[in-house]
Each structure stands twice: as structure tokens, then as C-alpha cells.
Amino acid sequence: MKAVLQRVSRAAVDVDGKRVASIGRGILTLLAVEPDDGPEQCEHLMERIAKLRIFADEGMDKMNRSILDIGGEHLLVSQFTLLADLTKGNRPSFTRSGSPEHARILFEQAVETSRRLGVPTQAGIFQADMRVELVNEGPATFTLQSEPRR
């Protein structure tokens, strides 16, 4: 799994002109599922996101607090294009992406795992044409990649 995390003061997802999810301060995660990913990778990645210290402490001089520490929210958006291969030609190849069926299962697991870890979590709609709006704090953007299954 590959994730791009953006520390936000707010973020939202619209589908067909309707707001389907929105959060205040927290993390917007764009998430892509690879063919070899399984439940273990999903669980580990969501635990990392929940514990990642990317928010400033009270002194505002260090990133020392997690989303759990600040009582933040999490917005997950499925985005297979994170796995695009752009090494040849001018058109991206998506052969490194998991099948839609496989990706849906793990995306739904990611949402449930984030909630189970105690983070108020919302999600975009899987395979929908979404409009994602965000205000990136910092800006602060991070990438995470899960370890492949053994």
C-alpha cells in the first residue's frame, strides 16, 4: 500500500456536486492498494498513520504530536493513480495497482481500522469521480509505503 498524507486544517470530498465527507484538523490520506497487499499491510499502515507525530507540540517548535494526541480527524480517499508507472511514454500505466475488487476490500478495512484505533474517520466513495478540497497546514505532506507481503 502506498499513502500520501497531508496535514490539514480542513478537507472535504464532493461527488456529483454533493458533500460526502468532511473533516476539520487532521490528516487527509490518499491511499493506493497494490496487488500483493493484504490485511497485515493495511493494519500496519493505519497504525503508523494514527501514531505518526506530524503535529506541533504546545511550544510549536517540533512535530511531536499524533492525530490521536490532538483529537484530530482522518479523511481517507482511494487513489490508484499513486501507483502509476510514468517511466515509458506519455501515458501512465496502472499495472502496479491492485484490482478494484481487491482494493475495495482493503480500502474499507483501512477505514474501519482507523476508526477502531480511535481516530474519527470519514471516507470518499470508492471508484467515484471525486472532488477533493483541502487546506494543507505547513504545507506538510508525507508518503508512507507498506512492506510487501512475505
Image (cartoon, rainbow, N blue to C red):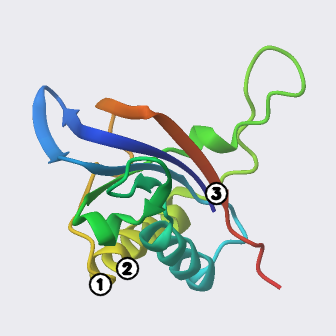
In percent of width and height, residue 135 lies at 30, 29
In percent of width and height, residue 116 lies at 29, 84
Query: Decide: marks 1, 2 in contact (CB < 8 A)?
Result: yes
Q: CA distance from mark 1 to mark 3?
A: 20 Å
Q: Is residue 44 left or right of residue 65?
A: right
Q: The residue under label 3 is which amino acid type?
A: Leu
SS assignment at label 2? helix
* Image quadrant where residue 111 sits: bottom left
Residue assigned mark 3: 144
- Crowd band around label 3 with a 10 angstrom C-alpha radius: few (<14), some (14–19), many (20+): some
Q: Is residue 4 left or right of residue 148?
A: left
Q: Quadrant of the C terminus?
A: bottom right
- Crowd band around label 1 with a 10 angstrom C-alpha radius: few (<14), some (14–19), many (20+): few
SS assignment at label 3? strand
Against 59, is 85 above or below?
above
Q: The residue under label 1 is which amino acid type?
A: Arg
Residue assigned mark 2: 113
Against 98, is 118 above or below?
below
Residue found at the very far right of the displayed protein: 88
N-terminal-most mark, 1 or 3: 1
N-terminal-most mark, 3 or 2: 2
Residue at figure coordinates x 71%, y 37% from the top left: 84
Residue assigned mark 1: 116
